[in-house]
Image: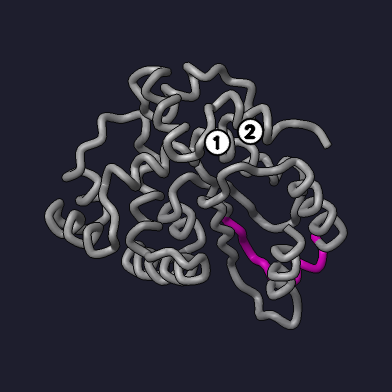
């Protein structure tokens, strides 16, 4: 979070007046202390930001993380228009960018983020789409269509990356479950349903396979006080 606040300095003078997009879709488990750092950074600088930022859109993640991130503007009052969105295309539209330009910009941003994280743009986009659909009946053809390719092309590109659709789905399920286990008191059955597992037994088996421990043991270890 401290590094993020340093990045935000680029929006201050001598930057030219501009609109601002904050894409927080990849936040999986927001930390209250980290949010406090951001609020403490922003509060005394709001007047400085108002000299250059004309409008700011925040793209929030799904689920509990989205509720926490989306509440940021309730903690910091700004003199320029701000709004939280679930859809980045809607956010860019609100910032005055036509859809063709917005789509091109999102592709460029996704590729930059994935390159920085050492993850292929393909897997990053697949994970993003899967996170929004875990509670739905997942159909590979539908996922591929949302990613702008055919089912056969998606399967081929996943094979070339040394993975499979099922393996990446399981990864997203467990990462999403970890965020829920860490940031909520939801029962394991509720967490299992939230990540698309048909039963608690299936969820526990999948979680143990990918992490080496049970969901309850993982939660107890990571939520244990200092």
At which x and y percent is residue 203?
41, 25
Quadrant assignment for the N terminus: bottom right
| Residue occupying the point 28% across, 42% down | 166
| Residue occupying the point 81% across, 68% down | 48
Up the image or down, 106 lies above or below 171; here it is below
Q: Is 141 contained in the magenta span?
A: no
Contact check, label 1 and label 2, Cβ < 8 Å: yes
| Residue occupying the point 42% across, 18% down | 200
At which x and y percent is residue 146?
26, 50
Residue furthest to the right in view is 44
Q: Which numbered dot is residue 182?
A: 2
Nearest to the observer: residue 76 or residue 171 = 171
Q: Is 120 displayed left or right of 55 in the figure? A: left
Numbered disc 2: secondary structure: helix
Nearest to the observer: residue 67 or residue 54 = 67
Name the residue that disc number 1 marks.
178
Q: Which residues are magenta?
A: 46-57
At which x and y percent is residue 185?
63, 21
């Amino acid at each position: 979070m401290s590094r993020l606040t340093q990045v935000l300095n680029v929006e201050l003078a001598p930057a030219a007046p501009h609109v601002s997009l904050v894409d927080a879709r990849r936040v999986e488990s927001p930390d209250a202390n980290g949010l406090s750092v951001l609020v403490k950074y922003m509060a005394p600088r709001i007047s400085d930001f108002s000299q250059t930022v004309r409008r700011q859109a925040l793209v929030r993640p799904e689920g509990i993380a989205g509720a926490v991130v989306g509440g940021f503007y309730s903690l910091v009052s700004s003199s320029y228009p701000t709004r939280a969105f679930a859809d980045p295309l809607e956010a860019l539209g609100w910032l005055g960018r036509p859809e063709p330009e917005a789509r091109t910009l999102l592709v460029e941003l996704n590729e930059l983020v994935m390159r920085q994280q050492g993850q292929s743009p393909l897997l990053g986009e697949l994970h993003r789409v899967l996170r929004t659909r875990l509670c739905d009946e997942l159909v590979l053809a539908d996922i591929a269509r949302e990613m702008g390719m055919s089912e056969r092309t998606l399967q081929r590109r996943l094979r070339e990356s040394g993975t499979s659709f099922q393996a990446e789905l399981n990864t997203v399920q467990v990462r999403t479950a970890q965020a829920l286990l860490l940031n909520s008191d939801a029962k394991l059955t509720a967490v299992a349903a939230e990540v698309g597992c048909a039963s608690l037994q299936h969820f526990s088996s999948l979680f143990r396979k990918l992490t080496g421990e049970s969901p309850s043991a993982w939660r107890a270890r990571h939520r244990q006080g200092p």
